[in-house]
Amino acid sequence: MSRVIIIAPETDPHAIAVRDRIGAGASILDTHQFPEKLKMSLGDHPDEIAIGGERVRPTAVYVRDYGLNPIVSEDELGGANWRRAMVALRERSEMVHSLVYRWEQLGIPVYNPPTGREKITKPYQIGLLAGAGLPVPETRWTNDPDEVRRFAEGRRIAYKPVAGGAATKELEPRDLERLDLLATAPVCFQELLTGEDIRVYVIDGAIVCGIKIVTDAIDFRQNEKALVEIPVDDQLRDICVRATAVLGLRWTGMDLKAGADGKLRILELNPSPMFLGFDSRAGTDIHGALCKALASH
């Protein structure tokens, strides 16, 4: 098999849209079905890869979703067999990631490569960007209540989970009274930026588009009033291209936000950004740019 492989659940709308636009030259590999329904074998040589009994060497790979969420029930995870369930999840993860590592080793373009996964962890990512001289917000990831109080003194602060997945909120006085909860898990605390929200898409070192997100909320997700395509000037272009190179990403949706001074800071680079909703509301064609990049190989 020689075609573009899209790693995602077969019901994922973004994966379906990419497959359908590329056409017969693309197919979805639903790794969530492994090992119950999907047969996969890796030999001792890098190119010995068989899926469903067929040797596979794709022309390009788009990693939308590795599909490695637990396939066991909550009862199993919390019950007597929890250890067995966690071992099974570890074994699945080892095989799926090894598959994509091998394709990357063979020189197959991967959007995005697994060797860059550690750079996506948010505390590491922001540190790399700051170390490269790129603009980022002042941030603390901590479980130390005293550090939070020092960091928050005299200014507005936002907080959110270290790994994301929940809305960003503003730190309020009542939150300072329950910092003992940090003993359960660390939290990300960040200077509150009050300016406009910008998303920029980058593919293979080139800017696809910039979009202004009009919102009244601290966290624009689910709170977008409008999405408006904007020109990307040379300064913003340089920031976005450099940030993508620092993290080793072939493709990303970057979120930036301005402070009270009007200057943009990088919040994060997403290695598998959604784009269908942005295209629909902003009139962009991120979808087409991604498909063109994948099919070009």
Image (spheres, rainbow, N blue to C red):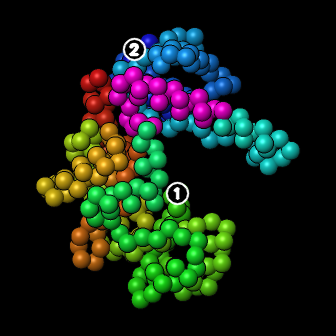
Task: Estimate the x, y position of residue 119 in percent, counting from the top left.
Answer: 42, 49
Is tag 2's residue or tag 1's residue first in the polypeptide sequence?
2
Q: Main secondary structure of the magenta part?
A: helix
Q: Residue at x 47, y 30 (%)?
A: 101
Camera-side residue: 120 or 28?
120
User: What residue is shown at x 35% (from left), y 24% (from top)?
Assistant: 107
Badge 2 crowding class, 10 Å Cα cut-off, few under 14, some 14 to 19, many 20 or more, is few
Q: Residue at x 39, y 60 (%)?
A: 127
- Whether residue 269 sits left or right of residue 93 in the image: it is left
Establish if 82 lies above or below 42.
Answer: below
Nearest to the observer: residue 176 or residue 121: 121
Q: Is residue 34 left or right of residue 64?
A: right
Q: Quadrant location of residue 151?
A: bottom left
Does the magenta run of residues contain 112?
yes
Q: Position of residue 148 (x, y in %)?
A: 52, 79
The answer to whether any part of residue 107 appears in the image is yes
Which stretch is magenta?
91-114
In percent of the image, x 22 and y 45: which residue is there? 207
Q: Looking at the picture, which amino acid does disc 2 mark? A: Ser
Q: Pick the quarter of the image with the C terminus.
A: top left
Question: Quick check: is 171 in the magenta stretch?
Answer: no
Q: Position of residue 247 (x, y in %)?
A: 35, 48
Please tell me in which quadrant of the rendered image residue 259 appears.
Answer: bottom left
Residue at mark 2:
2
Indicate the amino acid at tag 1: Ala
Q: Quadrant of residue 116?
A: top left
Q: Would you place residue 40 above or below residue 269 in this image?
A: above
Residue most extreme to the top: 54
Q: Secondary structure at mark 1?
A: loop
Residue at image mark 1: 163
Residue 272 visible to an observer of this rendering = no
